[in-house]
Amino acid sequence: MKSGLELAREHRLMPIEAIAERLGLLPEEVEPCGRFKTKVSLLVLDRPKDVPDAKRVCVTGITATKAGAGNTTTLVRPTQGLGAIGKNPVACLRKPSVGPVFGDKGETAGGDLSQAVRVEELNLHFTGDIHVIGAANNLLAAMIDASDSARRSPRNRRVARLWWQALDTNGRALRKVTVGPLGRAHGYARNTGLDITAASEVMRVVAVARDLHDLRDRLSAITAACSRDANRSRPGSSGPARGITVLLTDALRPNLVQTLEGQPVLIHCGPLASMDHRNNSLVADLVAMKLGDDAVTESGFGSDLGMEKLFSIVCRYGGLIPSPAVLVVTGGAPKHDRGVAADQHVERSAHRYAIELGMARARRHLTIIKTFGVPAFVAVNRRPTDTPPPDHIAFLDTFQGRGTGVMTTISCWRSGP
């Protein structure tokens, strides 16, 4: 079985200028960063508003297992299918962090023949947005530390949690550290730590900002430090906030790439799931809705985490109205909840029984989707490692006659070229 990277390298990709032109972007609205990726100017958002915005489709999943659910793969698959029938879809994805890619997480741009490319660039430095966001976060930390160290009186020193610096790799030993033990010339001794860049406050701000003015206003309002008497220190609209905004000018613009079949994909920002809203940037959604017929976006993890944050945070800040939600269910996830591994050799009746019991969790996720009043679709992600293959009848039976109002589609994960 070939890996996703090997399959991607066998495909001949279109120049990114051709993707941008087919999407309707003007030459002055793109800035190529190589042959297969480009920055998209926010001037797109100033186009006449008489053209209705595209529908916004959210792809989410049930509670994922260690094997994952295949949300990104399922997002790319309908995007390519819409393009094949003559539609103009635009997919929106988060930029993965560098650190987790080298662990068990693996590729985060889809899989097999349903992926955004080039995968090796997406999973690594890409256009450098995450590094710029980390540099902006550390610049603010340095400013706050310099200002705090300049105060001669220990009584005036801020002893609450100062602004932490950020790093885009997993540094568990650096989460809690003691700095400044060598005297005032090197700062004063205190406990601090490093955040992963995806969990930094600057990442959160960039992910929900609409333009540079909004970005500066949000940066000026964040709390960077707190004194002993609970007085909060903020960057303000001038000074630190202005300099950090200038540093983030290019990072605020979304990045355009393509799928293996040539459909456009906007990849921008990567806020951490457990602490932030776990969706791509707001400007990427706005650009996709302005240019395409359908904007397909992914909310990571389950509907109880990424999707709820999408509807409650991103849609509220951006004034967006969500359309259908796609719930991704793998053959192994329901069985995993009942203690049966996806590749475990047991009787077929035992597999079916485990699926029927485990799908109670999927029905709970569908209930969450229904509370937001949007239509729901179920995509069963079949994998070649499922032994035996998922019993489709068992999947269908769990949704029929239960008042869910759900249409079920079966999609297959190709096992080879």
Image (cartoon, rainbow, N blue to C red):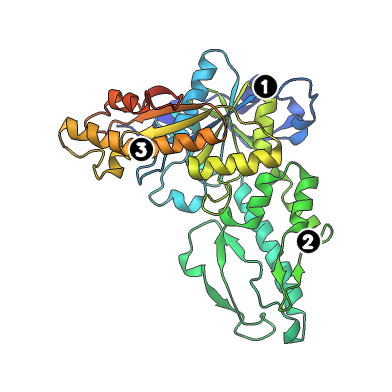
Would residue 246 appear left or right of 91 to someone viewing this image? right
Q: Is residue 280 visible?
A: no
Q: Mark 1 points at which residue?
A: 21
| Contact between labelled residues 2 and 1, with CB atoms less than 8 Å apart | no
- CA distance separating discs 2 and 3: 51 Å
Say what amino acid the circle numbered 3 marks.
Ala
Q: Name the residue under label 2.
A: 240
The residue located at (66%, 70%) in the rendering is 162
In the depicted view, which residue is nearer to us: 294 or 340? Answer: 340
Crowd tier of the residue under label 3, counting other residues whose Cα lies within 10 Å: few below 14, some 14–19, many 20 or above: some
In the depicted view, which residue is nearer to us: 172 or 357? Answer: 357
For marks 1 and 3, the one nearer the N-term is 1
Residue at the outermost right position: 238
Rendered location of residue 297, percent (x, y): 56, 33
For marks 2 and 3, the one nearer the N-term is 2
Q: Which mark's residue is nearer the viewer, 1 or 2?
A: 2
Q: Which mark's residue is nearer the viewer, 1 or 3?
A: 3
Badge 1 element = helix
Say what amino acid the circle numbered 1 marks.
Glu
Badge 3 element = helix
